[in-house]
Image (tube, helix red, strand yellow):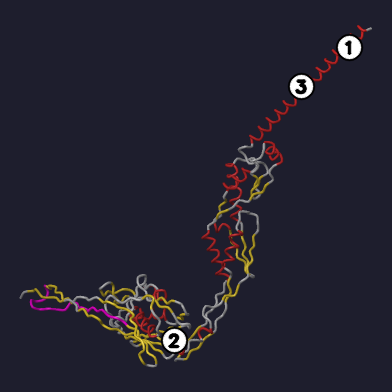
Amino acid sequence: MVDDRNKTEKRNYKNFISENKKSIYISLAIIITIITVGFIYIFSVKSEVESWQSKIYPNVTVHGVDIGGLTKEEANLKLKEELSSPIMDKILKVVVDDKEIDLKYSEVNPVYDVESITNEAFSLGKEGSLFEKKKLISKGINKELDAKITYDENELKKFEEKVKSEVNVNAKDATISINGGNISVDAEVAGKKINDDELHKKLVESINGNPSEEIQLKFTLEESQAKVKESDLKKITGKISFFTTSYTDTGDGRVTNMNIALKAVNGTVLMPGEEFSYNNLVGDTTPDKGYQKANTYIGNEIVPDYGGGICQVSTTLYRAVMGANLRSTERANHSLTVSYSEPGLDATVAYGVVDYKFVNTYDFPVYIEGYISDGTIGFNIYGNKEALGGKTYKLVNEVVEKYEPQVKYEDNPSLKEGEQRVKVNGMPGYKANSYQITYENGVEVKKEKISTDVYKTTDTIIERGTKKE
C-alpha cells in the first residue's frame, strides 16, 4: 500500500512538473512574441516618423494651400506658385464718408515671406516624443498658418497721398485787401481732412497675405481749421512802415525781373513767430518763369544774368521791414556797392546761396504790400499801429572807411602815342556800419548797431596808345 502510494505521488509530481514546464514555455513564447511584435511596431513607427523627418506633417495649410507632406523646398515653390497671383488681385477698400478708394495690392508690390512660414510649418510637431509624432502624422496637424508679406512702403505712402488728395477739402485762410488805405477782411472757411496717423496706422495693420479676405476700412473726415483767421487779420489796423527806392528802365529786362519778384512777395501775410524767406517765395530766377537777363554782380564783376535786378526788390523790402522793427535772421550785403542803396543798408540774394530772412516777432500778423511804377519800387508794411505805442524806426548808415580804386593801365595799339581812354571806371570800396534808430513820438530814444559791412573796390582801367605816327 505504501509503495503504491509513493508511486502515485511520484507520478503526480512528474505530471505537475511537466505541466509547469509547458506553462512556462507557453508564457515565454507569449512574452517573446509580444516583445517581437513590440519591436516590430516600434521599428515601423520609427521608420514612419523618420520618413517624415524632412517633410512638413500632414494637414498644414497656408491661406488654404496644403503643404503637408512636402519638403521645405517643395513647400516654398508651391506657395510662391499658388499665392503670388491671387494676392496681386486682392483689393483693400478705403471708405471715407460716401467715397470709396481702392488699393490694389499689385500697386504696393507684395512679396510673401515663404521661407519663414515654411520653417514654421516644418517645425510643427517635430519636438514631441516618438509616439506623439506618430499620432500627429496619423491624425494630421490641422493647422492653418498666415504668411506675412512685405511691400513697398513708398508706394503705400503714394496711396495715402492719393486718398488725401481725393477726400481732403482744404481750409481757406481769411484774406485781407487794402484799397486806398482802407482795410477789409474776408473770413476764413473751415475745411475737412482725414486723420493722417489713423489712415497710415489702419492701412499698415490691415495689409496681410490672405488673398481671399475682403478688407474695408472706414474713415470719417475731421474739420480742419484755417491757418489765418478773420480775428487775426482784424488786428491789422494800419501802415506801420514803408520804404521806396528809384530805378531807371535800362531796357535789359531789369524792370521785368523786379516786377516778377515783387509780385511773389506782394500780399504776404506773416503770422506771429513765422519766418519770412525771400528765396522761398521768389524761387530760382529761371527763364521759364519769365525772368530775363540783366546786369548783376557775380563775384566782383558786373555781368548779364537771369534775374538781374531782384536784389533791388530785396533791398527795398529790407529797409521797409527794418522800419517796422522786424529783425533779420539772415541778411548779407553785396560784394560791391549798388546805385539804389547807401553802403550798409542793402540786402543781396542769390537762390541757393544767400537769402534774406526775418521773423515776425509781434503778437499780431503783418501784411506786406509791394508796388512798382514810374521808376519807383516800394513796400508798405501793415500791422497793429496802436501796439507800437507811438514808436517809429529808421535804419541809418555810417561810413567808417572808404577805399579808393587803383588805376591800372593797358596798352592799346589802336590809339596814338600820348592818347588815353578810360576803359573801366573803378568803384570805391567801403566799410560801413548800420544802426537802428528808435523814435518815440518823434524823439530819438535808442540807437542799436545792426551790422558792419565791407564792400570791395574795382580797378579803374585806362588804355594808353602805343601807335606811332
Q: Position of residue 198 (x, y in %)?
A: 59, 66
Where does label 3 land, which residue? 28
Cα gap from disc 3 to disc 1, whole angstroms: 28 Å
Kind of element beneath mark 2: strand
Which residue position is annotated with label 1? 9
Q: Residue furthest front?
A: 2
Question: Farthest residue in the right direction?
Answer: 1
Q: CA distance from mark 1 to mark 2?
A: 141 Å
The type of residue carrying mark 3 is Leu
Q: Examine the rendered structure and indicate whether residue 169 appears above or below residue 153.
A: below
Residue sitting nearer the eye, 449 or 162: 449
Kind of residue sitting beneath label 1: Glu
Quadrant including the N terminus = top right
Q: Position of residue 166 (x, y in %)?
A: 57, 69
SS at mark 1 in the image: helix
Give the foreground label among 3 and 1: 1
Reply above or below: 63 against 54: below
Query: Eyeballing the image, is 181 above or below 345?
Result: below
Q: Is residue 419 magenta?
A: yes
Q: Nearer the viewer, mark 3 or mark 2?
A: 3
Q: Nearer the viewer, mark 1 or mark 2?
A: 1
The magenta-colored residue range is 413-434
Residue on which disc 2 sits: 382
Q: Main secondary structure of the magenta part?
A: strand
Furthest-left residue in this view: 469
| Mark positioned earlier in the residue sequence (3 or 2) | 3
Q: Residues within 10 Å of mark 1 (few under 14, many from 20)?
A: few
